[in-house]
Image (cartoon, rainbow, N blue to C red):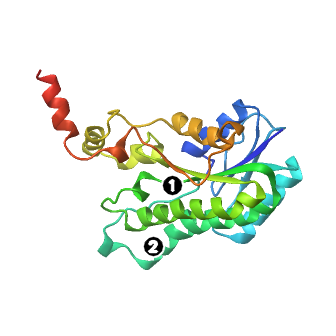
Amino acid sequence: MKTAIVTGAARGIGLATARKFLAEGWAVALLDLADATQPDAPETTLARHCDVSDPASAAAAVAAVMQKFGRIDALVNNAGIAIFKPLLETTLEDWNQVLAVNLTGPFIMAQAVAPLMTRGGAMVNITSISGLRASTLRVAYGTSKAGLAHLTKQLAVELAGLGIRVNAVAPGPVDTAMAKAVHTPEIRADYHDAIPLNRYGLESELAEVIVFLCSDKASYLTGQVIAVDGGFDSTGIGLATLRAARRNL
């Protein structure tokens, strides 16, 4: 049975991805700083506390996965944090904290997993549309995700010789608990105006793409950053005006 590691798996996209792996017949290790809820499948799941920014914690978690399942076929680097502040209010501590989890964490996990990964395995890094498009309040978060996009390409080149593929998914606005907590109705309306599909994505929709990239169906796909964003990254200004004009026809 193939085995996947998903970081940041206690909630949101990470938990949805873990559930999708289980539905596809994989075993899954759910790693998180918070207590991950272990699905009711003790033979095929492992919930483990892990700080991805700490090499010792990451190594211990990976060792526990190998001890229980004996193999690692996929790594999903989903764990991440966001501190939304203007540039002049972002402290060095804020900057270091965000980069430690969002960029250094995937580097640490990749180093821990790559020597043990089954040939033909895959890694997927969860970046963000904020790493492709600059926005206010995201000087640390957006920069960390842009760095992760390039780390994805670097890993793809360096790990190809081990038979490991590495890709990234860049979510646009997704109806996660975080988005619901910080996006006001006005912000949600702004996003809807700028997204061709005119809605937020679902956690399950992100999980579908992530698990696909880890599967044999994506066997010739590596080094790519795929925006799963309803078309947000492809869009310039004027979409809302165009919609209004169409309604008046």
The crowding category of the residue bearing disc 1, from other C-alpha atoms within 10 Å (few below 14, some 14 to 19, many at least 20), is: many
Q: Nearer the viewer, residue 8 or 233?
A: 233
Image height check: is 14 above or below 91?
Answer: above
- Amino acid type at mark 2: Trp
In the figure, is residue 134 to the left or right of 62?
left
* Residue pictured at 43% horizontal, 66% vertical: 143
**Secondary structure of residue under mark 1:** loop
* Residue pictured at 75% horizontal, 70% vertical: 56
* Image quadrant where one finds the N terminus: top right
The residue identified by callout 2 is 95
The crowding category of the residue bearing disc 2, from other C-alpha atoms within 10 Å (few below 14, some 14 to 19, many at least 20), is: some
- Amino acid type at mark 1: Thr
The residue identified by callout 1 is 127
Image coords of residue 161 (percent x, y): 75, 60
Image coords of residue 118 (percent x, y): 81, 51
Quarter of the view holding residue 185: top left
* Image quadrant where one finds the C terminus: top left
Image coords of residue 240 (percent x, y): 20, 37
* Residue pictured at 16% horizontal, 23% vertical: 247
In the figure, is residue 86 to the left or right of 43?
left
Closer to the chain start, of discs 2 and 1, is 2
Residue 76 shows up from this direction: no
Q: Which residue lies most toward the left here? A: 248
**Secondary structure of residue under mark 2:** helix
